[in-house]
Amino acid sequence: MNATNNKPALYSVSIEVPATSDMAFTRLCTLSNWWPEEYVGAPLQLNTEFILRTGDSHYSKNKVTEFQPGKRVVWLTTESARRTDDFDWTGTKFIFDLTPNGGKTQIKFTYDGVVKPNEEDRLIDICNLCIKEMLYTYLTSYTTTIEVDPSAAELFRCIQDVSKWWGGKDLEGKTTTLNDEFTIHHPGAHLTTQKLIEVVPDKRMVWLVTQGRLHWLKKDQNEWTGTKIIFDIHETGKTTTLQFTHVGLTPAKESFERVSQGWDTVIKDYLFNFVSRGIAHFE
């Protein structure tokens, strides 16, 4: 279909999240953690150019045209192609406006561009999926941050050595390279299997929980299944920062409070001490 046959489209959707506008903005701009397509490019800043794609069928080049930390980010699609039907949405703007609201933040997303005739409902469904489900889940998921003196490379190697800071003797499997899988089994309490689905040396690691059974849950013992555990590493000056996020572990989950407390201990105590002083606290 020729792009001239597309129809103008303007659609907005809003969510409210329990985070400051600065925190929400920073996490929102980490598109690789929640956007449904593969993100290729540098971290978002003014004039950043990046690619979003789904295999070989769906592709776009984009450029950040507005970037106001804590307030607003806009990117413009400069080139696009949906090869299944030649749909072209070049010139479309993706707009995020953040407004503080008593300790929380309202995020308004606006799609300002074009849509293929007869796909207005599909556009709404996609926007709602991206914002109300994927972004909301990411922004409301458990997250914590630690800062350590060792380099990004040293921190990354420590994260790979999972049994030294999580699981101990109850861990079986491999934990270092892409597609490795490992299981942690605390009999009567916890049985999870994680697969390494993204490994970027010294920068990022993502585990997919392919089996997650928490025996102590009353409603759904498989709440962890399908969730993702993300390690993002940033070297800043003399220190290195780790942002840890368990995507899908939200306040609505029965396991949220207890698992959040557990991650606080595992990341802020066990991993922090293992990285900082080579000390693991497992008996």
Image (cartoon, grey):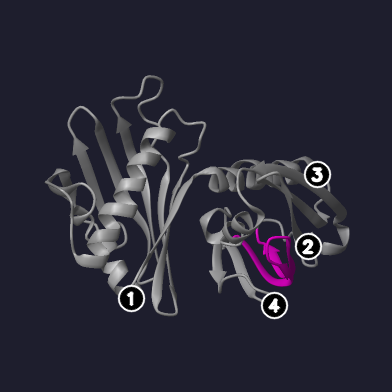
Give me the disc on residue 93. 2
Closer to the chain start, of discs 4 and 3, is 4
Q: CA distance from mark 2 to mark 3?
A: 16 Å
**Percent x, y of residue 25:** 64, 58
Q: Which residue in the structure is indicated by mark 3?
A: 120
Q: CA distance from mark 2 to mark 1?
A: 38 Å
Q: CA distance from mark 4 to mark 1?
A: 29 Å
**Position above or below: 101 against 162:** above
Q: Residues within 10 Å of mark 4 (few under 14, many from 20)?
A: few
Q: Which residue in the structure is indicated by mark 4?
A: 47
Q: Residue at x 33, y 53 (%)?
A: 267
Label 3: which secondary element: helix
Horizontal side of residue 183 vs 142, given as left or right: left
Q: Which residues are magenta?
A: 57-83
Q: Amino acid at mark 2?
A: Lys
Q: Amino acid at mark 4?
A: Asn
Closer to the chain start, of discs 4 and 1, is 4
Label 2: which secondary element: strand
